[in-house]
């Protein structure tokens, strides 16, 4: 009898652990943290935020995770059939059949509504409105558009950069120039970042019917040229924070070096045209964003 009870407890623990893992996969926790990180830094960069209130920072982080997680959950519901076809996404809970669409919808509605309500209650209506727009654009416009045209990448880059405006609006109760500068940096950054990922996974994406690369079929030099173009645009945009007095000369140097580094990685991709070069662009982009955002924050500390 004691053995049966013990086994029951283990099974219960395993089920709860598995369910938690599925919810973390549903919200794409690693991606969500990276997105919310930019919202928090943008909030701290807002002129009206003159001291670090860790309670408010935590609230913003949680609200951001809820809204972002909701958008990612809806994305997985809508794409459950295509996710099932791709090796890198076939283990997602809805695609694999471990979670029903109804459960995922309930989760996404509750988390999205809770995150937006927290932004209204603790911050302001403006930040909540931007968050709601970002969720809608990502889940209901970008997601279905991925199978129609590669312009979806441009559309998707908007909600991908809106966390900067959410954070800025939460801290400044406005959409002033500083917020738009941060939006522009994150908007441009996404193109070399995303196309590097699409380059490595293009066979999976093509099998699922996604049209994400600038070219019609396989990765081409045109794709690499597009990565170079957007990396190049980051250089003058990276100077704007200094010109509008958001940052000092030390931050300017760090941001400029980071932008040149991203450009060189994209040029290397054009020259080599290999998956390992695309992987370098991807990993460089992961490093780039926190380095740039923290460099901009450095002068305010």
Image (tube, helix red, strand yellow):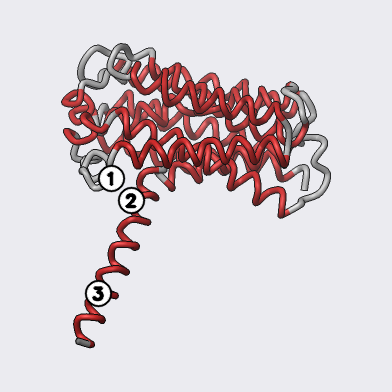
Q: Which mark is residue 8?
A: 3
x and y percent of residue 216 in the render?
Answer: 24, 12
Q: Which mark is residue 53?
A: none
Query: Neighbour class for label 3 at 10 Å: few (<14), some, many (≥20)?
Result: few
Q: Which residue is rendered at x = 45% and y = 17% of the image?
A: 155
Residue 250 sits in quarter: top right
Per the image, the residue denoted by label 2 is 22
Nearer-N-terminus badge (2/3)? 3
Q: Which residue is rendered at x = 73% and y = 21% of the image?
A: 177
Nearer-N-terminus badge (1/2)? 2
How far apart marks 1 and 2 lie (CA) works out to: 8 Å
Nearer-N-terminus badge (3/1)? 3
Query: Neighbour class for label 2 at 10 Å: few (<14), some, many (≥20)?
Result: some
How far apart marks 2 and 3 lie (CA) works out to: 21 Å
Q: Which residue is rendered at x = 82% and y = 36% of the image?
A: 48
Per the image, the residue denoted by label 1 is 99
How far apart marks 3 and 1 lie (CA) works out to: 22 Å
Tell me: residue 150, above or below residue 241: above
**Callout 2: SS:** helix
Residue 55 sits in quarter: bottom right
Lateral position of residue 28 relative to residue 260, left or right: left
Select label 2 or label 3 by which is in front.
3
Asked whether disc 1 touches disc 2, contact meaning CB atoms under 8 Å apart, the reply is yes
Single out the residue that lies furthest toward the front: 1
């Amino acid at each position: 009898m004691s053995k049966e009870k013990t086994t029951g407890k283990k099974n219960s623990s395993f089920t709860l652990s598995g369910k938690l893992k599925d919810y973390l996969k549903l919200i794409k926790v690693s991606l969500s943290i990276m997105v919310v990180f930019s919202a928090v830094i943008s909030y701290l960069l807002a002129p009206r935020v003159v001291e670090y209130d860790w309670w408010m920072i935590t609230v913003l982080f949680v609200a951001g995770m809820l809204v972002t997680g909701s958008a990612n959950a809806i994305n997985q519901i809508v794409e459950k059939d295509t996710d099932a076809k791709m090796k890198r996404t076939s283990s997602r809970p809805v695609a694999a059949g471990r979670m029903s669409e109804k459960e995922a919808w309930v989760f996404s509605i509750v988390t999205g509504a809770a995150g937006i309500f927290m932004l209204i209650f603790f911050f302001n209506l403006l930040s909540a409105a931007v968050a709601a727009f970002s969720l809608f654009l990502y889940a209901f416009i970008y997601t279905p558009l991925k199978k129609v045209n590669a312009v979806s990448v441009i559309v998707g880059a908007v909600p991908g950069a809106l966390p900067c405006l959410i954070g800025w609006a939460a801290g400044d109760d406005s959409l002033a120039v500083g917020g738009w500068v941060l939006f522009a940096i994150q908007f441009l950054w996404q193109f070399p970042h995303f196309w590097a990922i699409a380059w490595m996974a293009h066979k999976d994406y093509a099998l699922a019917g996604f049209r994400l690369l600038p070219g019609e079929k396989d990765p081409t030099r045109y794709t690499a040229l597009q990565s170079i173009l957007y990396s190049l645009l980051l250089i003058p945009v990276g100077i704007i924070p200094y010109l509008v007095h958001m940052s000092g000369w030390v931050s300017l140097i760090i941001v400029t070096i980071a932008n040149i580094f991203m450009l060189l990685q994209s040029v290397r991709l054009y020259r080599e045209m290999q998956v390992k070069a695309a992987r370098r662009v991807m990993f460089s982009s992961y490093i780039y964003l926190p380095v740039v955002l923290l460099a901009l924050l450095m002068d305010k500390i």
